[in-house]
Image (spheres, helix red, strand yellow):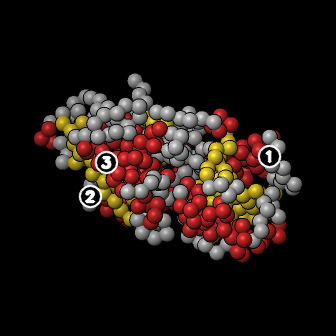
């Protein structure tokens, strides 16, 4: 039976209730593990440490709430077992990510590996370990199409690897469809149909730029610049000076580091750019508007995944998160919470730590959490996107406030749980 989670409230799980379903028996209480160990590889130091730490905060909150409710009921052992998160620091480097993943599996003997929680490049290295080890593997925030392309090309090899986020082409489709909509409505009129990209040197940055341009090229657009910078880069004057001389109709920027986004927006304004500016990802940070101030006004960006003033589930999550950590939520907090909640749900539905049964539960995933509804495209082992799943809307910053401008169906929607 299909079940949608997220509308029930039970015990300490005040945002999203976990239903402890029973499945066939295979053991006894004496054989039950002391805890269910979940290994999580994330960037906890280096240029993306802020992301890894935020993911950890969300994941730890989900685990804490499950444990406060008594843990996960495993029918195989007829008892509840608590969950423990064990972290490994990838330092944003694929080789190091593989090393710490090996340690989590062989030394810590985790029952489930999240590899990786943030970077697509690290994920693509770790996923090659999945055929070697008979445990469930999952990534949380990586979106690169290359991950799911590999799974689709060899589903038997990657049967136990699941990509817990949507495809990178979702961002590309949003960029393309937003500008088509704005042009149709008369809000935007390109003079030459030219576009420039300034992106970070990651699979995330490149895949988003490449997908969006391929779609726009079909409508007659030309690419006039493709500038790539390291994660955390903050001097964009050379790139902007070059692009300003080309005067493209649209500039797309894509960074996962807040300091890069803040610097780019400020320098964009300082250099007198007049192109329409579409940003990917970094405006998710509430600090961007605080740091960039008026330079952020009129920025168009995607995806506005967090909107607690309009979405009741997110408002409840923010209240509980703030009680624990003393600060407002960001996107990584939500993704970490949702990711761990998905792991908890998989073990709960399996009623077991048996890898094949847990993987089968992952395949049947269908629950609603902080960022939306999670359900897998089974051919690609990746989460579906769209209004009915994880929405990828476009927003514009006006007077320091985010307003959804696309798709039209979401512009005036106030979602409730």
In the image, is residue 245 above or below residue 332?
A: below
Describe residue 79's horizontal placement relative to residue 207 as left or right: left
Secondary structure under badge 3? Answer: helix
Specify the quadrant that holds the N terminus.
top left
Query: Which of the two marks, 3 or 2, is nearer to us in this view?
Result: 3
Q: Residue at x 29, y 48 (%)?
A: 64
Query: Where is mark 3, residue-wise?
Result: 63
Query: Where is mark 2, residue-wise?
Result: 108
Q: CA distance from mark 1 to mark 3?
A: 46 Å
Upstream in sequence: badge 3 or badge 2 = 3
x%, y% of residue 193? 83, 54
x%, y% of residue 284? 55, 54
Upstream in sequence: badge 1 or badge 3 = 3
Q: Residue at x 72, y 67 (%)?
A: 269
Q: CA distance from mark 2 to mark 1?
A: 56 Å
x%, y% of residue 232? 56, 70
- The total of numbered circles placed on residues is 3
Q: CA distance from mark 3 to mark 2?
A: 18 Å
In the image, is residue 142 above or below residue 197?
A: above
- Contact? badges 3 and 2 (CB < 8 Å): no
Q: Residue at x 30, y 44 (%)?
A: 65
Describe residue 226's horizontal placement relative to residue 328 as left or right: right
Query: Which of the two marks, 1 or 3, is nearer to us in this view?
Result: 1
Q: Quadrant of residue 44?
A: bottom left
Q: Which mark is residue 91?
A: none
In the image, is residue 398 above or below residue 367?
A: below
Upstream in sequence: badge 2 or badge 1 = 2
Query: Where is mark 1, residue-wise?
Result: 187
Residue 156 is at least partly visible in this image: no
Secondary structure under badge 1? Answer: loop
């Amino acid at each position: 039976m299909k079940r949608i989670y997220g509308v029930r409230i039970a015990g300490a799980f005040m945002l999203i209730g976990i239903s402890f379903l029973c499945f066939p028996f295979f053991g006894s209480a004496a054989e039950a593990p002391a805890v269910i160990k979940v290994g999580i590889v994330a960037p906890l130091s280096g240029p993306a440490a802020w992301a890894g730490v935020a993911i950890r905060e969300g994941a730890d909150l989900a685990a804490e709430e499950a444990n406060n409710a008594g843990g996960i009921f495993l029918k195989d052992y007829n008892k509840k077992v608590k969950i423990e998160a064990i972290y490994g620091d990838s330092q944003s480097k694929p080789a190091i990510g593989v090393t710490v993943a090996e340690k989590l599996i062989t030394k810590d003997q985790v029952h489930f590996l999240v590899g990786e929680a943030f970077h697509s490049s690290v994920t693509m290295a770790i996923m090659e370990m999945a055929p070697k080890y008979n445990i469930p593997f999952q990534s949380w925030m990586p979106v690169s199409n290359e991950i799911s392309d590999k799974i689709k090309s060899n589903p038997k090899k990657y049967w136990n690897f699941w990509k817990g986020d949507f495809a990178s082409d979702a961002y590309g489709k949003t960029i393309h469809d937003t500008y088509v909509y704005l042009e149709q409505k008369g809000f935007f009129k390109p003079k030459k149909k030219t576009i420039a990209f300034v992106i970070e040197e990651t699979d995330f940055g490149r895949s988003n730029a490449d997908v969006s341009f391929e779609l726009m090229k079909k409508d007659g657009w030309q690419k006039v610049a493709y500038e790539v910078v390291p994660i955390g880069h903050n001097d964009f004057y050379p790139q902007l000076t070059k692009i300003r001389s080309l005067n493209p109709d649209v500039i797309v920027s894509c960074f996962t580091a807040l300091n890069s986004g803040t610097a780019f927006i400020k320098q964009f304004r300082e250099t007198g750019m007049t192109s329409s500016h579409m940003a990917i990802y970094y405006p998710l940070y509430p600090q961007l508007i605080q740091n960039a101030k008026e330079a952020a006004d009129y920025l168009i960006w995607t995806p506005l995944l967090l909107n607690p003033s309009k979405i009741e589930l997110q408002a409840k999550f923010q209240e509980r998160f703030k009680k624990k950590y003393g600060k407002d939520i960001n996107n990584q907090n939500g993704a970490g919470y949702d990711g761990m909640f998905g792991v908890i749900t998989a073990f709960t539905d399996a009623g077991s730590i048996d890898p094949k049964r847990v993987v089968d539960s992952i395949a049947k995933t269908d629950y609603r959490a902080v960022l939306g509804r999670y359900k897998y495209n089974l051919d690609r082992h990746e989460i579906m996107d769209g209004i009915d799943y994880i929405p990828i809307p476009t927003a514009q910053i006006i007077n320091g406030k985010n307003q959804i401008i696309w798709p039209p169906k979401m512009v005036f929607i106030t979602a409730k749980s």
